[in-house]
Image (cartoon, rainbow, N blue to C red):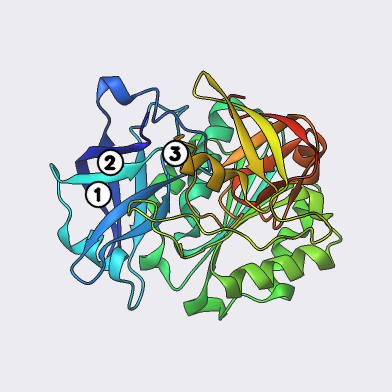
Amino acid sequence: MSRVHQIKVREVVTETADAVSLVFDIPDDLVSRFAYAPGQYLTLRVPSARTGSVARCYSLSSSPHCGDRPTVTVKRTAGGYASNWICDNLAAGSLLTVLEPAGNFVPRSWNRDFLLCAAGSGITPIFSILKSALALGKGRIVLLYANRDRRSIIFAAQLRELARRHPRRLTVLHWLESERGVPTARGLGTLAKPYRRFDVYLCGPPGFATAAKNALAQLRIPERAIREEEYRSLTDNPFEHHQPVAAPDPVPARPAGDTATVKVEIDGETHTLPWPRHRKLLDVLLDRGIDAPYVCRESACGTCVCRVRRGRTRMIMNEALIDEELARGYTLACQTLPESDDLHITFDE
C-alpha cells in the first residue's frame, strides 16, 4: 500500500502574522493510516516550477487525544520557499500530497512531569505533547517558550485558556526577546532549575536549542531525560522517483559479493530476500518494490524504524533511536547493514 495520499485542507487558521495552521479533512478510508502520536509530523509535497516539487516536514500541533482534526502549523521563514508558498497559496478546499505520520519525538509514558522547552515554531510538536499530557496524565507540565515579542507567540490564546483550566498542573513561562534579549543558558537555567527532575522535551532553532541544552547541562540533568526534535532539511525528495544509493562497503574484510538472507515482515506480508552486505536494508526493500516507510534516509526522522528479531546488524548512523530502543533490537532500515548470515526483521510492531 502506498503511503502517499492526497488530502484536502479543511481550514486554514491564522495563528500569527507569519504562521498558519492547516486543518486536514481525512477521508474515512484513510483514518487508520493517519493515526498518529503526539510529537509526530507530516511530510508535505510543495509544487515547485524549478524542481517539480520539494518535500517538507511539519509537526502536528493537534492532539489525537483531544478530539482534534490532524493539523500542522507552518511559520514563514526568511527565504523559505515551501513555508512561504504554503502561507500564501493554501485555502480551505486545497489538495495536498502528504505522507503518513512519522517521527519518534513521542513520550514513552504520560504519567510523568514534563518540562517542555520551545522557541518560535518549535512550539508545534510541543503543543501536541502538552495537550496530550493534560488529557492522559496526572503530572505537572511546565512550558518554557521563547519568542521575539508577544505578537509572535503561536497559540497564545489557547495557552492562556489551558493554563486557566489547569492552574495546578500547567505553568507557562514566556521568554520574550523584546523584553529580555536573546535567550541565554544562564537565564534559561534560572527558569528551569525548579523543574530539573522533570522529563525534558526540546524543540527550537539551533541558537535556542544550544542555549537550552547548555542550561540543562549546568543543572546536571542527565541526557537520558532529554529528548530533542531537530529542524532538518530533506536532501532526498520522497515524492520523486529516484534510485537508491548504495553505501560503500564498511566491512572490507568480506568479499563485495557476499550476501546474507533476511526474512522481513511488513504490512502483514513476509518476504525472504538476499541482502548484500554492502547495501542498506531500505535500499534492498525499495529495489524489490516493497513499500517500506521512510522520509529522510539520513537516520534523523525515525520513520524507517524496524526490529531485529534474529541475527546481528550494524547501523552506519543513528540520530533517532535512544539506548533503550537499541537494547530492545530496534534499528533504522535506511542505515542498517547485515552482519549475520541469516536474519529476521519486522516492521509490524
Residue that carries the numbered disc 2 in the rendered image: 23
Residue that carries the numbered disc 1 in the rendered image: 13
Q: Which mark is residue 324?
A: none
Q: Is 44 on the left or on the right of 345, as rendered? A: left
In this rendered view, identify the residue nearer to me: 196 or 65.
65
Picture quarter with the N terminus: top left
Percent coordinates x, y for residue 247 in the rendering = 62, 60
Q: How many marks?
A: 3
Count neighbours of disc 3 (C-alpha within 10 A) and say few if under 14, some if 14 to 19, many if 20 or more. Answer: many
Q: Nearer the viewer, mark 1 or mark 3?
A: 3
Q: Amino acid at mark 1?
A: Val
* Mark-to-mark CA distance, 1 and 3: 21 Å
The answer to whether the residues at label 2 and label 3 have Cβ atoms under 8 Å apart is no
Residue that carries the numbered disc 3 in the rendered image: 101
Q: Mark 1 or mark 2, which is nearer the start of the sequence? A: 1
Residue 167 appears anywhere in the view: yes
Picture quarter with the C terminus: top right
Q: Mark 3 or mark 1, which is nearer the start of the sequence? A: 1
Percent coordinates x, y for residue 91 in the rendering = 15, 50
Count neighbours of disc 2 (C-alpha within 10 A) and say few if under 14, some if 14 to 19, many if 20 or more. Answer: many
Seen as rendered, the residue at the extreme right is 220
Q: Is residue 298 above or below residue 189?
A: above
Q: Is 238 on the left or on the right of 185, as rendered? A: left
Q: Nearer the viewer, mark 2 or mark 3?
A: 3
* Tag 2 secondary structure: strand
Count neighbours of disc 1 (C-alpha within 10 A) and say few if under 14, some if 14 to 19, many if 20 or more. Answer: some
The answer to whether the residues at label 2 and label 1 have Cβ atoms under 8 Å apart is yes
